[in-house]
Image (spheres, rainbow, N blue to C red):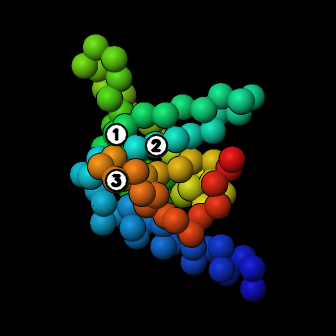
Amino acid sequence: MELTRLADAEDNIRAVLEDMTGSTICIRANMGRSKVMECQGTIMQTHPSVFLVEVREKRNRTARASYKYVDVLTGSVELSHPESGEPVFPWVESSN
């Protein structure tokens, strides 16, 4: 079934991000109306439906942002490794 496959994919994303807790990642999030946010942050926590990222902002400030695993699955949020630029989930279609 399609729903089972999507649930398994979401669980796989969560498992990978749990293993990456404490790692730095690059985030590219489609915010709607042609707005795209690009930033770098550290994965802080994973929860059943969302994961938290501590984002570095200007003037040495930090903020926390939360993203849904479904957004990663649909390509609205893209995660990549900061050193290589390689996507964390290459099998997910990008929103572009």
Q: Residues within 10 Å of mark 2 (few under 14, many from 20)?
A: many
Task: Tell me where residue 92 appears, x and y as whole percent.
Answer: 59, 64
- Amino acid of disc 1: Gly
Dot 2 or dot 3, earlier in sequence: 2
Report the Cα–Cα distance between label 2 and label 3: 14 Å
Report the Cα–Cα distance between label 3 and label 1: 15 Å
Whether residue 45 appears in this view of the structure is no
Label for residue 53?
A: none
Report the Cα–Cα distance between label 1 and label 2: 7 Å
Label for residue 84?
A: 3
Q: The residue tagged with tag 1: helix, strand or loop?
A: strand
- Amino acid of disc 3: Ser
Residue position marked by numbered label 2 in the rendering: 27
Q: Residues within 10 Å of mark 1 (few under 14, many from 20)?
A: many
Q: Nearer the viewer, residue 96 or 3?
A: 96
Image depth: mark 2 or mark 3 in front: 3
Q: As drawn, is 45 to the left or to the right of 14?
A: left
Dot 1 or dot 2, earlier in sequence: 2
Label 2 near label 1: C-beta < 8 Å? yes
Residue at 67%, 81% (x, y): give it.
4
- Amino acid of disc 2: Ile
Residue at 65%, 28% (x, y): give it.
35
Residue at 75%, 85% (x, y): give it.
1
Whether residue 69 appears in this view of the structure is yes
Residue position marked by numbered label 1 in the rendering: 41
Q: Nearer the viewer, residue 96 or 1?
A: 96
Q: The residue tagged with tag 3: helix, strand or loop?
A: loop
